[in-house]
Image (spheres, rainbow, N blue to C red):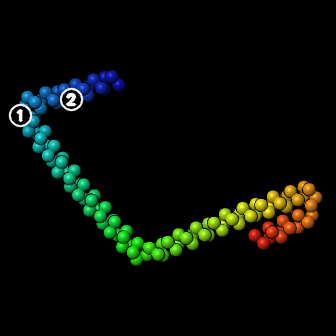
Amino acid sequence: MGIIIGAIAGLTAVFVVLYKNNEEFRNVVNKTWNEVKIIIGTIIDALKGLFEAFIDFSMGVWSKYGDDIVAVIFSAFNIIANIVKTTLNVIKDVIKIVTSLIKGDWQGVWEGIKSLTKNL
């Protein structure tokens, strides 16, 4: 790592000396840097345009389908919530049946089976 850091420091020092003392080198560096700035500016402008187009598209979709999207999300959430609730109730019923069997509580077993059947 020390050799790599030393090499980078050495190259940087050579670059600085050349830039300060060699007009031709300085002109090439400045020209290259200006071209890089133009390319970066072009890329940034393209990304801005792409981002603006995406926002416009999203706003159009939302204004046209926003209520439908919200309705679908709520429906999906309700379905998932019902599945989770039913699953937890089934687990609760199975636990009630097993514990009632262990206790010898036949009425509890029967109530657990009725509840399990209803939830299924």
Q: Which mark is residue 44?
A: none
> Is residue 75 found left or right of 34 in the rendered image?
right
**Residue on which disc 1 sits:** 23
* Residue 36 higher or lower than 103, as above or below: above
Kindly identify the amino acid type of the residue bearing the numbered disc 2: Thr
Q: Which mark is residue 12?
A: 2
Q: Quadrant of the C terminus?
A: bottom right
- In the picture, residue 108 is in which quadrant? bottom right
- In the picture, residue 62 is in which quadrant? bottom left
Residue at image location 24% in from the left, 54% down from the top = 43
Whether tag 2 and tag 1 are in contact, CB under 8 A, the answer is no
CA gap between label 2 and label 1 equals: 17 Å
Residue at image location 14% in from the left, 46% down from the top = 34
Numbered disc 2: secondary structure? helix
Dot 2: few (<14), some (14–19), or many (≥20) neighbours within 10 Å?
few
Comes first in the chain, label 2 or label 1 = 2
> Is residue 58 found left or right of 13 in the rendered image?
right
Q: Quadrant of the N terminus?
A: top left
* Residue 13 higher or lower than 47, as above or below: above
Residue 61's x, y, as percent? 39, 73
Numbered disc 1: secondary structure? helix
* Residue 62 higher or lower than 87, as above or below: below
> Is residue 15 found left or right of 106 in the rendered image?
left
Kindly identify the amino acid type of the residue bearing the numbered disc 1: Glu
> Is residue 50 found left or right of 58 in the rendered image?
left
